[in-house]
Amino acid sequence: MNAYSAYRDTVKKLLDSGCENAEFEARQLVEFCFSLNETQLLMKNRENVDGLKLKRFNDCVERRSLGEPLQYILGEWDFFALKFKVGKGVLIPRPETEILPRLAIDQLKKTGGKVVYDLCSGSGCVGISIAKFFPNCRVYLFEISDEANYYARQNIKLHNLFNVELIQGDVKKGSKYFGLPNPDVIVTNPPYVPTYDIESLQREISFEPKIALDGGIDGLDFYNVISASWFGCLNPGGILAMECGENQIRGVLSFFLNISTGGKIIKDENGIDRVIMLKK
């Protein structure tokens, strides 16, 4: 079989399985397994592919048709124009989360801050993105999950960073427990899906770790912790930037009404209120 025939068969199979971006994902799998970009795929449409490569390709297609996220199959994904290693046990980086490093970078440019905390850091994509822009900053990644920290370590090594420190621990213990220098910026994409909503999410999300999704009964457990045990450790003039779920803005802000001096709400590319930035 040639690669183009394999590609066309895959588009149909992925469409039949409910994949919304079948053509894009089929091209990604072709490039991953056959090392052919879109142009090469069209130019070599009559050349038969190696049998072992075809078997690997078919295995990947089967995994995707059963719902496994494309990012896990490829083993990496782009975030903030950088590549990050991902796989089972770590939350997949998403475009809307790029708001967090963008806000942090803008703040650090203005203030010259030197310390950043990334709470519930997962793969490390947010904190590492910031660290790449500011080699003189110290970025601390806080994450409880062994699986997520495995990928965070790989990503720190991948980007050859020496200004990032991975802290394995439970952020619910609060900032004082860790005894680190006070931050100028805190960023966080905490678990914020209400517990009883997790089962109704799209099937791909069922492959992602529940610990990275489950924000308690109302999805707000971690924002309560952050307001009570982390916001206060910010240096004067510092900012906290938090991703949150659709329709959670009012609930999240209720924890910070009497402790923040101001802030703003940032919408994602779909027009959804996605990130809250608060000033100390």
Image (cartoon, rainbow, N blue to C red):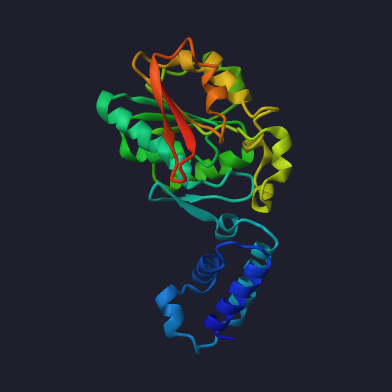
> Is 136 on the left-hand or right-hand side of 230?
left
**Which residue occupies the foreground of this view, 94 or 86?**
94
Residue closer to the observer: 271 or 263:
271
- Point 63% across, 67% down: residue: 60
Q: What residue is rendered at 57% in x and 83% in y?
A: 5
**In the rendered image of this protein, does residue 19 appear above or below residue 139?**
below
- Position of the N terminus, as image quadrant, is bottom right
Residue at left offset 47%, top offset 17%: 231
| Up-down relation of residue 186 to residue 71 (above or below) | above
Total marks shown come to: 0
Residue under the image location 68 percent in, 39 percent down: 210
Q: Is residue 207 left or right of residue 84?
A: right
Viewed as shown, does residue 244 lie left or right of 208? left
Quadrant hosting residue 229 = top right
Using the image as rendered, state which of residue 111 and residue 128 is in the foreground: 111
* Quarter of the image where the C terminus is located: top left
Residue 170 in view in this figure? no
In the image, 48: left or right of 264?
A: right
